[in-house]
Amino acid sequence: MHGADVMEKAGITTIPSTVFKNYDEAIKHVMDNPKRYVSKPIGDGAKELSYVAKSAADMVFMLQKWKKSNAYKGNFILQEFHGGVEFGVGGWFGPGGFNKQFCESWEFKKLMNDDLGVATGEQGTIVRYTSESYLADQVLKPLEDFLHGLAYTGYIDVNCIIDKDGFPWPLEFTMRPGWPLFQIQQALHNGDPAQWMLDLINGEDTLRTSKAIACGVVIAIPDYPYCKISKKDNSGYPLFGLTEEDVVNDVHCAEVMWGKAPSMCDGEVKMNTPMFVTAGDYICTVSGKGATVSDAREKCYNTIKKKIEIPNSVMYRTDIGCRLEKQLDVLHEHGYASDCDWE
């Protein structure tokens, strides 16, 4: 909500939202104004409490369900639903302002293909850097004076819905680095990462990025995304065949540690072989780069097939980037990402 206030003061139009302190008030609001809504917790609410309803009845049902289970004691908002293409942009900001390269991204938040299942935050993302971002012109650059006033240094992105008329509706700020975006970005960064970040702090822009498009896919194992609830021990599962070279290039480790496990050697089982093993259920992000979205997808999924072999039912989406085959044409019509192609 603070972010929405900042955007409005900067002249950026935001989606109308209403804050609620309890579920009864929210249920009455939806009953009196039967529209399609999005619910979001304010503060440290679980991601599962962010919900995009299909109808007013759907929203009322979920509010009743959360009330019964006492799911969240804090404040939350109901936001009017706006349909369109989800599209985000971010930038690295310091005393010298925004770095020249802006990061445009397309997130895939649901657990399963075709955006089915629970919202997990992000299951994969298409990412690219560009010095000319029409979306950044509208929803990031107007914030520069405010960020200077905070003496802010770091990454900031705004995820938006581009409606049928090409108007960008900001959804929220995200202050990163965070998984998996920062991991995917690293596939596009050139040079010493510590050096350009130090330079950013000192007001210099030395970030050098690839012109390629990157596809990143999150790799997990059960009971993801509910491991913290089930408290299942997901440590020690071997990442067969994964080398140190792999984790420097295309496999970006998250909950991974060095351990020992059985391995195959000349057709026989060798016990207690040193190797990478899991340290949780959110294992890693695999990335691939290409000149087009389809190229980046192909390289990413080829790496997954060759390098990811883990016991305990590996989980990942196989359609990261696919919806851009149609959505990029829509964005191009309105002047967005005009030099980003599907194939």
Image (cartoon, rainbow, N blue to C red):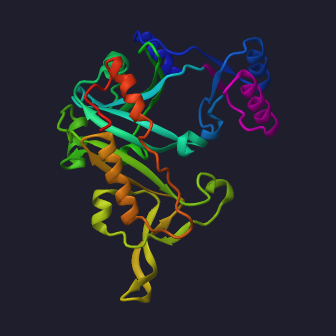
Which is more toward the observer, 80 or 338?
A: 338
Identity of the residue drawn at 53% across and 45% down: 113
The percent position of residue 291, horizontal first and vertical second, equals: 24, 41
Magenta range: 54-80
Classify residue 336 by image quadrant: top left
Q: From this viewpoint, which residue is outermost toward the right?
A: 68
Q: Is residue 239 above or below residue 230?
A: below
The percent position of residue 307, horizontal first and vertical second, equals: 37, 65
Which is more toward the observer, 99 or 94?
A: 99
Residue 94 visible in the snapshot: yes
Identity of the residue drawn at 49% across and 22% down: 84
**In what quadrant of the picture does the N terminus appear?**
top right
Q: Is residue 113 above or below residue 140?
A: below
Instruction: Verify whether residue 61 appears in magenta.
Output: yes
Residue 88 visible in the snapshot: no
Which is more toward the observer, 231 or 61?
A: 61
Classify residue 174 by image quadrant: top left
Which is more toward the observer, 170 or 109?
A: 109
The percent position of residue 144, horizontal first and vertical second, equals: 32, 19
The percent position of residue 285, horizontal first and vertical second, equals: 41, 53
